[in-house]
Image (cartoon, rainbow, N blue to C red):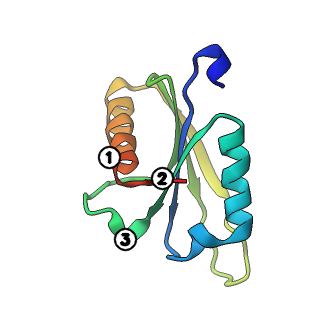
Amino acid sequence: MHDRGVVVRRIFIFDKPDLHTDSDFCDICAMQVEAGIDVRVLEHGKITQSLTGLSDFILFDGGVSYETVASASQRAFALPSILNTKLALDIGQIRKRVADFEYLWSLGDPV
């Protein structure tokens, strides 16, 4: 990634305090770091600011946001699936996502 001057940052937000010590999760993080991705982890409980409408999102050059919403399954054993996706191009929405990401990034811990 850095060969082309592209900076890629990723935050894993988790609600299980011990996830960052899980060996499979650590392997995933290590692979991403080796690929040149700057990775941080963030325990959900550290988020104090209200982030309305926060879903999984990817920002591309601060100009496009790819957003996904997981479905809420009623079955305890079911894995979440993607309910919908959208490409946000509205500059107001993009600015909000950039601000959300920077806030979360500031709270995260480097891997």
- Alpha carbon of mark 3 to alpha carbon of mark 1: how far? 14 Å
Number of callouts in the render? 3
Q: Give residue 11's position: percent from left, percent from top.
A: 51, 50
Q: Residue tagged by mark 3?
A: 45
Circle 1 residue: 103
Q: Which residue is mark 2?
A: 55
Residue 104, x across and y down, in percent:
38, 50
Q: Residue furthest left?
A: 49
Instruction: Tell me the mark number nearer the camera, choosing from 1 and 2.
Output: 1
Task: Give above or below for 2 relative to 68.
Answer: above
Q: Position of residue 84 (x, y in %)?
A: 61, 49
| Pick the front one: 48 or 23 | 23
Residue at 54% across, 27% down: 7
Evaluate if marks 2 and 3 touch, with contact meaning CB atoms under 8 Å apart.
Answer: no
Q: Residues within 10 Å of mark 3 (few under 14, many from 20)?
A: few
The residues bearing labels 2 and 3 have C-alpha atoms spaced at a distance of 16 Å
CA gap, disc 1 and disc 2: 14 Å
Which residue type carries mark 3? Answer: Gly
Is residue 72 visible to the viewer in this orientation of the structure?
no
Mark 1 burial class by Cα count in 10 Å: few <14, some 14-19, many 20+? some
* Quarter of the figure with the N terminus: top right
Q: Quadrant of residue 21?
A: bottom right
Q: Is residue 97 left or right of residue 86?
A: left
Which comes sooner in the sequence, label 2 or label 3? Answer: 3
Q: Amino acid at mark 2?
A: Ser
